[in-house]
């Protein structure tokens, strides 16, 4: 099993807490050229119905809700969940100062402990590629949604951050860098999977660019993933030299960002 869907690795290394995830988030926050916040953009597309019952799977540190506290509907019931208890603790800390009555629960998307047709909305952002049995998870999501419910799933495009993969080829040949080299649920193929469970599927794309002018944050970003354990010290040093040289020569490392949101129903 690849690291991307190895739950033992993910729980023990990547998502035991938000430390490594935050390294990656900070790079995007500092160097993305589109300054409209990603979490505001996602929230723009969420269609809350009166009294909506909402579940987020893989909530991480709860930034989707933190960035949109000013526009949460007062009559909704929102449960934030993650398969990592440590990450769920991070979510609770993130929202500790909010008076909104969020509910927090450890949930594996492959076995959602909720009744049939009990939810108006399920959200799963940048997490379906971590699920070992994604078809089982999608069936569970469909089961707990009401007939009129909506499923929102953000993910990356196949060529997202491809310039980083190209850097890796100079250092480690065909090494599959992090999630991008192993991505199993992306914008180009996600619709086909979703249509096995939902009658209607819409895709909304969000393209951007990273213009990284400092080497260290990019190096930290790359090594926060599986490359941190897979590359030798010599390879890590070579990678750092390549990045530093490119910034010195060109002024920045330019990296395309391709992401988007699936909206599924019916």
Image (cartoon, rainbow, N blue to C red):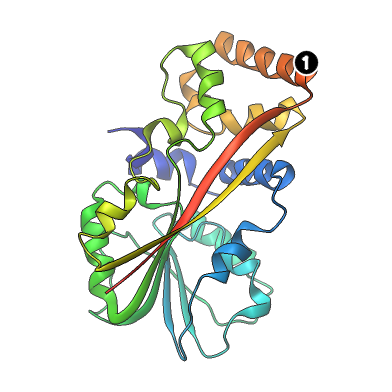
- Say if residue 168 shows up in the picture: yes
Quarter that holds the N terminus: top left
Where in the figure is residue 68, as x and y percent of width and height? Answer: 64, 71
In the rendered image, the vertical position of residue 228 relative to residue 209, given as above or below: above
Question: Is residue 249 left or right of 243 when viewed as pictured?
Answer: right
Where in the figure is residue 28, as x and y percent of width and height? Answer: 65, 44
Q: Residues within 10 Å of mark 1 (few under 14, many from 20)?
A: few
- Could you say which quadrant of the image residue 43 lies in? bottom right
- Say if residue 112 shows up in the picture: no
Question: Is residue 203 left or right of 254 when viewed as pictured?
Answer: left
In the rendered image, the vertical position of residue 209 relative to residue 162, given as above or below: below
Q: Work out whether residue 122 or residue 16 is closer to the camera in this orientation and state it.
A: 122
Q: Count the marks: how many?
A: 1
- Could you say which quadrant of the image residue 264 lies in? bottom left
Where in the figure is residue 165, as x and y percent of width and height? Answer: 50, 25
Residue at 31 percent of width and 60 percent of height: 109
Quarter that holds the C terminus: bottom left
Residue at 41 percent of width and 52 percent of height: 127
Question: Is residue 76 left or right of 83 when viewed as pictured?
Answer: right
Q: Work out whether residue 266 or residue 217 is closer to the camera in this orientation and state it.
A: 266
In the rendered image, the vertical position of residue 55 relative to residue 33, given as above or below: below
Mark 1: secondary structure: helix
Where in the figure is residue 91, as x and y percent of width and height? Answer: 56, 62
Return the residue at label 1. 249
Q: Work out whether residue 96 or residue 39 is closer to the camera in this orientation and state it.
A: 39
Q: Work out whether residue 73 or residue 98 is closer to the camera in this orientation and state it.
A: 73
Residue at 50 percent of width and 38 percent of height: 160
């Amino acid at each position: 099993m690849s690291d991307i869907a190895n739950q033992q690795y993910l729980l023990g290394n990547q998502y035991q807490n938000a430390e490594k995830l935050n390294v990656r988030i900070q790079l995007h926050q500092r160097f993305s050229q589109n300054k409209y916040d990603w979490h505001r953009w996602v929230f723009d597309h969420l269609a809350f119905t009166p009294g909506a019952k909402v579940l987020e799977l893989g909530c991480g540190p709860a930034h989707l809700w933190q960035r949109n506290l000013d526009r949460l509907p007062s009559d909704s019931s929102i449960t934030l969940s993650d398969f990592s208890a440590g990450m769920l603790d991070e979510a609770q800390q993130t929202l500790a100062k909010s008076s909104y009555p969020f509910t927090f629960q450890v949930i594996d998307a492959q076995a959602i402990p909720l009744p049939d047709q009990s939810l108006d909305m399920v959200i799963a952002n940048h997490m379906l590629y971590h699920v070992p049995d994604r078809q089982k998870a999608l069936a569970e999501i469909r089961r707990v949604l009401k007939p009129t419910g909506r499923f929102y799933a953000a993910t990356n495009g196949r060529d997202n951050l491809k310039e980083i993969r190209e850097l890796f080829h100079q250092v480690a040949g065909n090494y599959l860098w992090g999630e991008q080299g192993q991505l199993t649920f992306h914008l180009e193929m996600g619709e086909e999977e979703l249509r096995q469970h939902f009658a209607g599927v819409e895709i909304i794309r969000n393209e951007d660019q990273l213009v990284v002018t400092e080497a260290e944050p990019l190096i930290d970003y790359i090594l926060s993933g599986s490359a941190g354990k897979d590359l030798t010290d010599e390879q890590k040093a070579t990678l750092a030299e390549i990045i530093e040289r490119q910034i010195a020569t060109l002024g920045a490392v330019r990296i395309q960002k391709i992401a988007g949101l699936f909206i599924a129903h019916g």
